[in-house]
Amino acid sequence: MGHDDGSVQARCSHITAGMRHTLMEGLTEMWETALEARRQLADGSPVAVPDELLRKGEEK
C-alpha cells in the first residue's frame, strides 16, 4: 500500500467519501432498528430525548 508502517492506522488512514457514506448508512440502519425494537417495549420514555424520538415514530 505504499506505507513503511505496517500498522492498522497506516492502512486505514485513507477514508473516502464513499466509505463514510456506507458507514453512515449502516449506523443509521442499526439505530433505526434499535429504536423500533425499543418502541415495541414501550411507546415512550421518561427521558426527554428518547421519548421524543419514540413518539416521532408513531407519526409515520
Image (cartoon, rainbow, N blue to C red):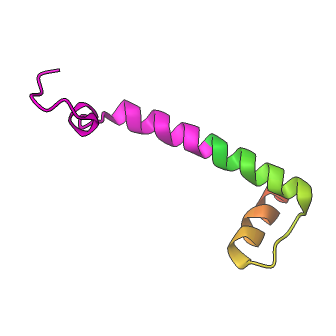
Residue projecting furthest to the top: 1
Q: Foreground residue, 1 or 6?
A: 6
Q: Residue at x 64, y 41 (%)?
A: 29
In the displayed structure image, the side of residue 6 where residue 35 appears, left or right: right
On the image, the x and y values in percent for residue 5 come to 13, 32
Q: Quadrant of residue 41?
A: bottom right
On the image, the x and y values in percent for residue 12 come to 28, 34
Q: Foreground residue, 21 or 3?
A: 3
Magenta residue check for 21: yes
Q: Quadrant of residue 44?
A: bottom right
Q: Quadrant of residue 26?
A: top right
Residue extent of the magenta highlight: 1-28
Q: Quadrant of the N terminus?
A: top left
In the displayed structure image, the side of residue 10 where residue 24 appears, left or right: right
- Indicate whether 5 appears above or below 34: above
Tally of numbered tags: 0
Magenta residue check for 47: no
Residue projecting furthest to the front: 6
On the image, the x and y values in percent for residue 9 come to 25, 39
On the image, the x and y values in percent for residue 54 come to 79, 62
Q: Residue at x 34, y 35 (%)?
A: 17
- Indicate whether 49 appears above or below 1: below
Q: Residue at x 30, y 36 (%)?
A: 15
Q: Residue at x 90, y 63 (%)?
A: 42
